[in-house]
Image (cartoon, grey):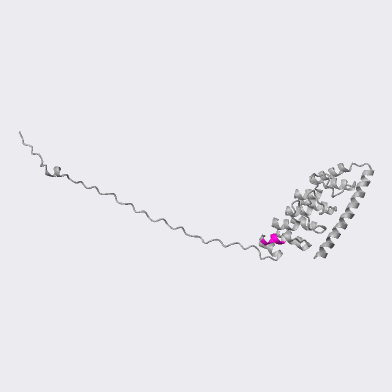
């Protein structure tokens, strides 16, 4: 496992070195010709944002680097920006023009990382055809596979694992992931607790109204002994 990981790292370093040399040579030729490289890069990013493939193609013919990040504050390549906009058409076009899914931004996130975060499954599949870096991370140290587990997209996780991505953090995170993802890591999945049985409410006891009290009239001794007055006729 360690030897395979080292081999992948060395391969990635070699690819980056070749890309850096090509980029330097291209920029040097443009600068020597008096072309405003920064302006061309800015125009290229704007054309991609508009979805104007014709204008973007013309700028590539002039020597613009398809992976340029200088025209973006967060240092996003045009491909990363297309991913964040969820413009799958432009993503596919840029990939066809040689855009790299491995170009990191200021925080280390690659276009592939952004595609995983935004759950663009079809774009992830296309990027994995050329991606060399399967373990990029963001500024907080969250690696690509762990992010995929957190996002909860089983298809993307499966694609990453099939391409050789691995992460101890992702393996741990998968323990509490939905069953479809947990099974991909050999876990049994999350078992949801059974709902508590419904308890029928106890009816309140019927309240019987108390009878009204009976009031007895008691004659006083004086009233009982006083004879009725006899009225004589005149």
In front: 134, or 121?
A: 134
Asked whether 172 falls inside the magenta stretch, the response is yes
Q: Residue 18 versus residue 140: which sits nearer the camera? A: 140
| Helix, strand or loop for the magenta stretch, by majority | helix
Give the quarter of the figure containing the N terminus. Answer: bottom right
Quadrant of the image for the C terminus? Answer: top left
The structure residue drawn at horizontal position 86% and vertical position 60%, both measured from the top left corner, is 10
Q: Is residue 230 shown left or right of residue 60?
A: left
Q: Which residue is most to the left?
A: 234
* Point 95% across, 44% down: residue: 32
Q: Which residues are magenta?
A: 171-175
Residue 57 position within the rendered picture, expressed as x and y whole percent measured from the top left = 86, 48
Q: Residue furthest right?
A: 32
Vertical comparison of 57 with 161: above or below: above
Q: Looking at the rendering, which quadrant does residue 143 occupy?
A: bottom right
Q: Is residue 228 left or right of residue 152?
A: left
Question: Is 66 within the magenta?
Answer: no
Q: How many marks?
A: 0
Q: Quadrant of residue 162?
A: bottom right
**Relative depth, front residue between 47 and 27:** 27
Q: Position of residue 34 (x, y in %)?
A: 93, 41
Whole-percent x, y for residue 58 in the image: 87, 46
Residue 223 location (% of width, % of height): 14, 43
């Amino acid at each position: 496992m360690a030897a395979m990981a080292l081999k992948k790292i060395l391969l990635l370093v070699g690819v980056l070195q070749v890309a850096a040399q090509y980029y330097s040579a291209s920029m040097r030729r443009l600068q020597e010709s008096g072309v405003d490289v920064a302006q061309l890069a800015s125009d290229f990013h704007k054309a991609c944002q508009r979805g104007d493939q014709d204008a973007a193609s013309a700028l590539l013919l002039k020597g613009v680097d398809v992976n340029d990040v200088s025209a973006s504050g967060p240092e996003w390549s045009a491909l990363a920006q297309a991913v964040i906009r969820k413009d799958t058409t432009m993503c596919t076009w840029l990939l066809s023009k040689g855009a790299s899914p491995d170009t990191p931004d200021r925080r280390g996130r690659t276009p592939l990382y952004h595609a995983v975060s935004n759950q663009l499954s079809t774009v992830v599949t296309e990027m994995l055809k050329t991606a060399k870096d399967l373990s990029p991370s963001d500024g907080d140290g969250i690696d690509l596979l762990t992010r995929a587990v957190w996002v909860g997209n089983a298809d993307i996780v499966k694609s990453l694992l099939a391409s050789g991505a691995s992460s101890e953090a992702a393996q741990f995170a998968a323990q509490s992931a939905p069953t479809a993802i947990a099974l991909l890591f050999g876990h049994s999945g999350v078992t949801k607790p059974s709902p508590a049985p419904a308890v029928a409410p106890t009816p309140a006891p019927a309240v019987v109204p108390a009878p009204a009290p009976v009031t007895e009239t008691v004659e006083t001794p004086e009233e009982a002994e006083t004879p009725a007055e006899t009225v004589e006729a005149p």
